[in-house]
Each structure stands twice: as C-alpha cells, then as structure tokens.
Amino acid sequence: MKKWLMRQYWRIQQSQAIIGLGFWTATITLLVWPYVSWRFASNETLLLIPMTYVGLIGIATAVLTIVLLAGFFYDVTFGLWRDHITVNQERNPFTTYKLNPTWGIVIAQTNAILRRVAPEDEEIQRYCKFVDRMLVWNSKEEIWARAMSSWKEIMGDEDPFLFYLDEEARRNLEEAADKLEDF
C-alpha cells in the first residue's frame, strides 16, 4: 500500500511541472486581460480571428516565453542548479561518510585483495585496518539491518555471510535485522 501511494505521489510531482505551466499561463493571462482588453475590440478581426482571441493568445505566449526564458537563464546563464546539486551531495551522508551495504561489500572485497597483495607494506595494512573499522561502524546503521533483512526475506538467503565483519558485528547486524518492523 505504501509503495502504491508513493508511486501516485511521484506521478503527481512529475505532471506538476506541465500542469503548473498551464495554470500559470491561464491565471496570468486572465489576470492581465481586464487591463488590456480595451485595446482589442471584439468586433475587429485579424486573419479572420477575433481580436479578443489574438489578445489572449498574445498574453499567453508572452507568459510562456517569460517562463521559458527564466528557465533558460536559470540553467545556462546562472547555472544555479549545479550549486543546488552540490549542496544536495554535501548533505547526503552516503556521499560523505556512510556506506550503503552493497557498496560496503565491494569495498570489503577490494580491501581483502589489497591486504593480500601487499602483506608486508605497513601503510597499506594500516589503511586496510581503517577500512575494516569503517565497515564495522557502518554495519551498525539501520540501512545495513534493512539490507540484511532483505537478503534473508526477499532473496531467501538463510545466511548472508559478510566475511569482513567480526563475529560480534555480524551477530549485532542479524539481531537488528530481526527486530525491524515492516511498515
């Protein structure tokens, strides 16, 4: 039910831009019309089109042009969306210091390979220990418990084994996954 509702909400958001543009155009056109209608006598025509319609179409075209120009300047000239995306990325913990579980598996595999390639290099081993600590720390996050729960319930995997976690971290993660409530 929750997923269905979120899909409907997403659909509303996606259509909102086009519908909003239509409402903007209609609203502003009808708000401006009383101030300029005297210029367009209803008994005159232009190419067989009554001047009233020419005036309304002209105002609507002007509104659409202004909105599109504002979008163009926002995008091309000022590039404000780039800063917006940068701020979003900076505020997203999964691009700064947290790991999602799938990415954690990839990093753990790379870390294991690196550890085996240079067993005598102290700096590399120190780095590998840091990655191990980071993975254990991340395994305490709820998203990891949700992933563990999904691996068990959706994939039907009885024992999703995460080799890079020590026994205590694995046990804690499994307990957290078992305690999750499905909303």
Image: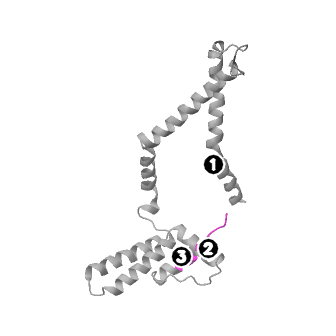
Marks 2/1 in contact by CB < 8 Å: the verdict is no
**On screen, 165 above or below 134?**
below
| Residue that mark 1 sits on | 14
Q: Whole-percent x and y of residue 15? A: 65, 46
Earlier in the chain: of badge 2 and badge 1, it is 1
Where disc 1 sits, the SS reads helix
Earlier in the chain: of badge 3 and badge 1, it is 1
> Tag 3: residue type?
Leu
**Main SS of residues in magenta:** helix
Q: Do we see residue 75 in this rendering?
A: yes
Q: Residues under labels 2 and 1: Cα distance?
A: 29 Å
Magenta highlight on residue 63: no
Magenta highlight on residue 181: yes
Picture quadrant of residue 183: bottom right
> Tag 1: residue type?
Gln
Where disc 2 sits, the SS reads helix
Where disc 3 sits, the SS reads helix
> Tag 2: residue type?
Ser
Viewer-nearest of discs 2 and 1: 1
Of 57 and 63, which appears nearest the observer?
57
Which quadrant of the rendered structure holds the N terminus? bottom right
Q: Over which residues does the magenta segment extend?
A: 171-183
| Residue that mark 2 sits on | 150
**On screen, 135 above or below 9?**
below
**On screen, 65 above or below 12?**
above
Q: Do we see residue 28 in this rendering?
A: no
